[in-house]
Image (spheres, rainbow, N blue to C red):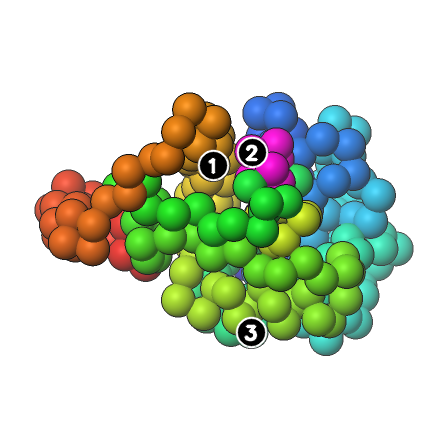
Amino acid sequence: MKNADARRAVADAYWRLGDRGLIVGSSGNVSVRTRKGMAITPSGGNPNDSGPETMAVTTLDGVVSGKATPSSEWAMHAAIYRLKSDASCIVHTHSDACTALASLNQPLLGFHYMVLRFGGNDVPCTPYVTFGTDSLAEAAAAALADRSACLLGNHGMILHAGNVDTAVADAVLLETLCRQYLLALSAGTPRLLTPDEMDAARERFKSYAPGRANR
């Protein structure tokens, strides 16, 4: 994607996630892959007052074009783009339910078949690593080796998708599932679907929505 188009796409996704309450203030960031790197939300940005012209552009090695400073988490986005050739958009949020579950250092387990949408029978959680570091970038990329989303211990969540609309929808879905899981935990011990039940749901998804649950 050309830089100008990528800036517009990032700004649009940023606003949509802010409008849904998934990104508040300067917490969280969004990027879109470009021909030579990515467009990404700026350091200290806010979805309520950020337009395309405020988005930063950088290579995956951190060489910045223009005046905008990329998000402090740019290296985490870059590591995922290097690992995932099919990733066109990345969303990182500190949304309430995702962050609450990540603060328990627990994965999102297979209590519901929609967990499959993120590539497996669970959504893993990384250990806590200081934000904005190469170590966090490495931890996130490792957790996403066979998933499209993960929780970041005591931090939030991050996911990738093939386009902006899917990335925004998946961020909403992950937050919803984490909230439902936490509600179930507060009432007792959720029954987890068995591997056979998850496999049956995965097969069902192939005809219901090809490619959506097993990416």
Label 1 element class = helix
Disc ID at residue 20: none
Task: Tell me whether the residue at label 3 lies in contact with that at label 1, contact meaning CB atoms closer than 8 angstroms.
Answer: no
Q: Is residue 58 visible?
A: no
Relative to 11, 126 lies left or right: left
**Residue pointed to by mark 3:** 82
Main SS class of the magenta portion in the image: helix
Q: Residue at x 69, y 53 (%)?
A: 40
Pick the front one: 156 or 104 = 104
What label sits on residue 178 in the rendered view? 1
* Quadrant where the C terminus is found in the figure: bottom left
Asked whether the beta carbons under mark 1 and mark 2 sit within 8 Å of each other, the answer is yes
Q: CA distance from mark 1 to mark 2?
A: 5 Å
Residue numbers of the magenta segment: 95-100
Given residues 171 and 31, the one toward you in this image is 171
Residue 97, label in figure: 2
Specify whether residue 46 is painted magenta.
Answer: no
Q: Residue shown at 69%/43% (left/top)?
A: 28
Q: Position of residue 102 (x, y in %)?
A: 59, 46
Query: Looking at numbered disc 1 in the image, what kind of residue is underneath it?
Result: Cys
- Seen from the viewer's position, the closer of residues 202 and 102 is 102
Amino acid type, callout 3? Arg
Q: Is residue 61 visible?
A: yes
The amino acid at mark 2 is Ala
Q: Is residue 106 above or below residue 185?
A: below
